[in-house]
Image: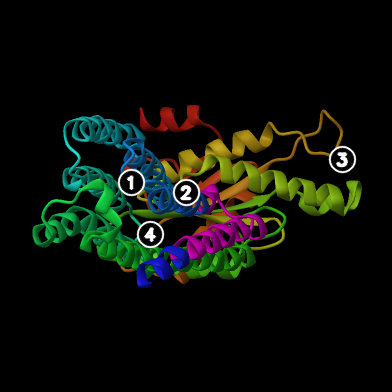
Amino acid sequence: MREQIIGLITPLSAVIFCVLFLLIWKRGKMDNYVLAFAATYFFFTVGFTVTHLLDTASSYVFHLTQFFYSLSVASAIWGLTRRVGQPPYLGALLLVYGLSAATLAVAVAVSADISSRLIIVNTGYGVMYVIGLMSLLNAHRREAIDRFVIFMHVLLAAQFLIRPVVTLMFEGSIIASEYRESIYYSVVNLSLSIISLSSALVLLGACIYDQMVAVREKAELDMLTGLRTRRAFEQDVIAWLEKAKQEAVPVSLVVADIDHFKAVNDVYGHQTGDNAIAEFGEVIRSTIRDTDIAGRIGGEEFCVLAWNCDGAAAMAMAERVRRRFGDRAIEGMPEDHRLTASFGVAGRDEGEGYGRLFARCDAALYAAKQGGRNRIVHDGKMDKNNVVTEWRGEDELRAARA
């Protein structure tokens, strides 16, 4: 009776989780890894149903069960690794499944005892989870929920590799026709129920956490440019400057301002001004690296923290932004009209905080404006390294270094 109740509750709960993940994916507009979680519980439901409804004496039942459970495991691994930007190693998972399926076929052909079949298929699932675990451990994310996910992965791998062997040590051999009356059948039912529920709760927690982060990040982004707002930018920069201090990593700050922006609003209107701001934000976003931080800190003023970047490299990055923006046509302006931007650059001095660094960088921007605009000015701290403090192109920089 207990097995029948579990046999009903487990697939029903899996269907509920499948639908729940589908709703989270659809309504929350989340990444496809959530869809993979839904697929995980769909395939799990099919595999569980096959095992518990079809005649286990039939040779094809274990092949069907292995196929759908393997799809369930692969979907979970794909979703979890995609969530943290790691490779799922689908080729390795396919190889494990192929080897397990071939070994299972031999076991089915040579003996009616299903003990070996159970060890073969569960070992395959366990190895798959070990592969997924190795990929997850290489991820840089280490929030509390990520540690829960890794811990869950360890438990899944361990129970698939250990549980069958331990159970069968007490059970001995199992004939296919007597499978549903065996101790193993009771243990696996209870185990799958616990695993299904606990895994779903962890995955749901990961989805909820990611949704909260997405909402928070969206609130911290400037709607016009997609870059950080001033408040969010300064909070992140302060934290990253502290990290740079601890790790002895060079960082530089770049402040940029669109030239004659008030005239753009006055002559072409505020919508065209907004188009110019959005275009400049897009140029910055497409030019900087993933390790850099960019924000809109004023009306037409932007700031970038260049990570692991000295003053010369920051000037080179600013020059790429300057040239690319100068080549962009702005919607609402005549086709032959182009806008320019001025830049101030400052490398962080030892022990320097954000306030002092920004003040030096802003002073360099003011000097660029006073010097004729459409240029990059360094705050002058790097003259001893033979880097020019005013730069209007890469040719000038190369000439100064020669």
Position of residue 277 measured from the top left corner of the image (x, y, whole percent): 72, 50
Type of residue at label 2? Val
Type of residue at label 4? Arg
Side of 366 relative to 83 (left or right): right
Q: Nearer the viewer, residue 242 or 150?
A: 150
Comparing labels 1 and 4, the label whose residue is closer to the camera: 1
At 75% from the left edge and 46% from the top edge, which residue is drawn? 276
**Which residue is labeled 1 in the image?**
56
Q: Are marks 4 and 2 in contact (CB under 8 Å)?
A: no
N-term-proximal mark, 4 vs 2? 2
N-term-proximal mark, 2 vs 1? 2
Q: Are marks 2 and 3 in contact (CB under 8 Å)?
A: no
Distance from the alpha carbon under mark 1 to that under mark 3: 72 Å
Describe the element under mark 1 as helix, strand or loop.
Answer: loop
Comparing labels 3 and 4, the label whose residue is closer to the camera: 3
Q: Are marks 3 and 4 in contact (CB under 8 Å)?
A: no
What label does residue 254 carry, if any?
Answer: none
Q: Quadrant of the C terminus?
A: top left
What label does residue 46 carry, if any?
Answer: 2
Crowdedness near tag 2: few (<14), some (14–19) or many (≥20) residues, C-alpha within 10 Å? some
Type of residue at label 1? Thr
**Which residue is labeled 4 in the image?**
348
